[in-house]
Image: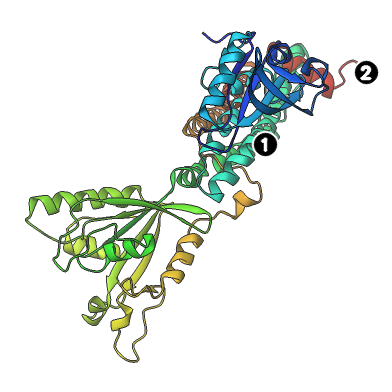
Amino acid sequence: MIDDHDTIVAPATASGGALAVIRVSGGEALKICDRIFHGRVPLADTPGNTFRYGRIVENDRIIDDVVASVFRAPHSYTGEDSVELSCHGSSYIVGEILRLLIAAGARMAEPGEFTIRAYLGGKLDLAQAEAVADLIASSSRAAHAMASTQMRGGFSEELETLRDRLLQLTSLLELELDFSEEDVEFADRRELRTTMQRIGEEIERLRRSFALGNAIKEGVAVAIVGAPNVGKSTLLNRLLNEERAMVSEIAGTTRDVIEESIDLGGVRFRFLDTAGIRATDDRLERMGIERTLESLRRARIILYMADVQQLAAGQSHPDLTKALGEEFGEAFTPGPDQRILTVINKTDQLPEGYSLPEGVIGISAKLGEGIGVLCEALHAAVDTEALYHGEAVVSNSRHYEALTAAGEALRRARQRLDEGLPADLLSEEIREVIRHLGSITGRGAIAPDEVLGNIFSKFCIGK
């Protein structure tokens, strides 16, 4: 059971480095550290945002020379008095300092407890707290930018703006109840409908951004598909710059989906090398093809590979849907967020004077020709510019579900508005939308005094 009144301690850095940081937070943080820290000035007499050099000492034994960073409440990560001890990264030294701090009155922090305290202390909302973990786990420039925007409150600000606009609508509707005997309509129903529609469009924009955000967070899935022996495994090996996938002239060598990740231009791509698509009676090969089809459905980008032999056979422009229908008898319709890039392999074997069809990318996976152009096309297929300019992109499934529920609740409210629902019941419908949006940041439903505060601060009744 977490007790937010205890003073807690934990390493703030991973083991194995030259230096380590040990974080202490709580009302007794400075006093506890002073019991083992020996410097020219006690930490309890040190102002916030100040560094102190000293030694960690047990009796007459010196454990290590350290630098103590002092943060005074509320100007710290947790909002409490905090000390960060920078010491050498030896696991023995870190263990000894932790032991002494616990003996001096601190306790080991639970997983995530520093961030829980930051949330409880009003330093972060729930969305920002979740972004802390995403920032730590970010494995590409795009994932880092997305988590940074959310941790700085960009997403929360958009939600707060939507919440304030909905709160204003609720305030207007509930204000009508106070003047019901005078038959006053404070909320013009036409303007109310227009405002609700615009809010709904903004909720839907955020909700739809989840497809991109989740792909960037988990790695953009790229399925490499095509007939057997067109060079799918050779391309994967070329992109990885290592022999990851087995290459053979024997058709049907790849029986299972091979997955590997690569960072291209600041975006992590997850490449799925799939079994060649063809009609076959081989049970194992057919199972591989079925997994290929499953990879197609979950991929954000599909690299459909053909080679010059297919072009020479009279196929003017290789088409994935047609290939699936003719060779496997399986229909496939790309999803709205999927991109198909057609790649012609073995361009080193193109006949003299032959030009590739428009819209395809020519490569030689074996020789490495055209790989740079292919990587540029992959990067262009993922719109990351909004991320680097601080635009909020949803990457958390909990946030996506809450936005979906908010959008559905708002659609119901608009429908009830069109049906002429009374102001008090319509206000309850809008409150439901606010509740779903508030669950993302931890604001939840409207507090009892929020509507009154909104009314008296904006509408100047009685003046």
- In this picture the colour scheme is rainbow
Residue 280 in sight here: yes
Q: Would you place residue 199 above or below residue 3 in this image? A: below
Front position in the image: 446 or 122:
122
- Judging by the rendered image, the residue that carries numbered circle 1 is 152
Q: Secondary structure at mark 2?
A: loop
- Which residue: 39% across, 73% down? 360
Crowd rating for badge 1 (residues with CA inside 10 Å; few <14, some 14–19, many 20+) = some
- Which residue: 70% across, 31% down? 165
Which quadrant would the C terminus be assigned to in this image? top right
Q: Amino acid at mark 1?
A: Arg
Q: Nearer the viewer, mark 2 or mark 1?
A: 1
Distance of mark 2 from mark 1, alpha carbons? Answer: 40 Å
Quarter of image, res 133: top right
Give left or right: position of 350 versus 435: left
Give left or right: position of 164 versus 136: right
Q: Position of residue 422 (x, y in %)?
A: 62, 19
Give left or right: position of 244 versus 96: left
- Judging by the rendered image, the residue that carries numbered circle 2 is 463
